[in-house]
Amino acid sequence: MSWRVANTCAERKFGSATRKQIIMFLADKASDDGSGIWCSKGTIQRHTELGETTVKRTVREFLKEGILIETGARTCKNGFTVVYRIDLAKVEALEPTAEPETETGSTVAPVQSGPGTGATVAGVPGPPRPPNHPKTILKPPTRRREAAVDEEAEKILAAYPPDRLRSEAACLAQIKEAMKVGITPEDLRQAVQAYATDSAGFTLSKVCFSDNWFQSRRWQAYVEKQAADREKTAVLEADHHARLACWISDRSPMCKHITAPQVTALLASKLVTQAQIQAAGLRS
């Protein structure tokens, strides 16, 4: 285990709690330079308790993004296992989890950065000032940020079927914990709404009360499905844009069916140029 790699990964955002969970497990297996990670996807799945499809998809994403690099293979009883390396430069380029420093304006009596000498009485120096440099003072979360988190958590809980609500305080605490590890409020809200739709009409003996539902992370399957659906939609959209780009490149008669928003999207993705758009008789 490398504390250096684990700390580097812990201090960066990876886009979702699932991605963070997998990269932290891999970091636990790495050497100080990020190399020597030798564990199968089945091992990752068993230890993280995530779905097999989720693990495979996330590892593919990391490889595509350059966060993970295949460095070889080692034989095992089932054939061979790929050896990975975490690219620390790629990880360090990600957005940090720490809140940015905020300016609070000038102060009348700013805190001194150097050591103080204390007051003097009859020429005798007093005790030194306490170490109250800003670097030694932990910043509490702002009230505005706490209020925003509370409001989001309450909106998510409000989407739960009202006849199954129980232990509101415990539910809100679990929701905040999920958001703290990277689950977006919108994903959680959609997960609750999806469960409410799926379980509509169930008798009370078959439903899950809210405190148990959030405590057992029943929302995770819905969040993973949402991510898979978004990925599938993105792939279909990319294929469609590639086909439209071919039409424009070939100046196909089918170009007349391309809409202005599609032209804008193609230009933004740099699949075509402004000159090609004009040559095909289209306008951005």
Image (cartoon, rainbow, N blue to C red):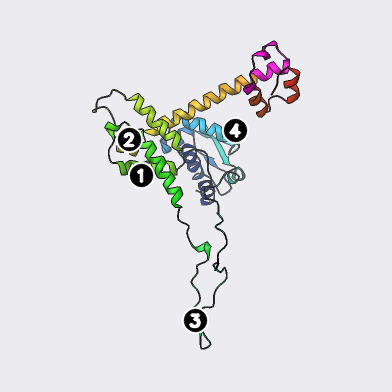
Instruction: Report the residue marked by disc 2.
Output: 213
Q: Can residue 234 be seen in this view?
A: yes
Q: Quadrant of the C terminus?
A: top right
In the rendered structure, the answer to whether residue 80 lies left or right of residue 170 reads right
Instruction: Report the residue marked by disc 1.
Output: 173
Q: Which of marks 3 and 4 is nearer the N terminus?
A: 4
Q: Which of marks 1 and 3 is nearer the N terminus?
A: 3
Q: Nearer the viewer, mark 2 or mark 1?
A: 1
Residue 29 pos. (x, y %): 50, 44
Residue 21 pos. (x, y %): 46, 40
Residue 187 pos. (x, y %): 44, 33
Above or below, 146 against 49 in this view is below
Mark 1 surroundings: few (<14), some (14-19) or many (≥20) residues within 10 A: some
What type is the residue that disc 3 sits on?
Answer: Gly
Q: Does the magenta stretch include residue 261?
A: yes
Instruction: Report the residue marked by disc 4.
Output: 64
What type is the residue that disc 1 sits on?
Answer: Ala
Marks 2 and 3: CB-CB under 8 Å? no
Above or below, 23 against 231 in this view is below
- Give the number of the disc on residue 126: 3
Q: What stretch is highlighted in magenta?
A: 243-262
- Number of dots carrying numbers: 4
Q: Is mark 4 on a helix, strand or loop?
A: helix
**Residue that appears at 30% across and 37% down:** 212
Mark 2 surroundings: few (<14), some (14-19) or many (≥20) residues within 10 A: some
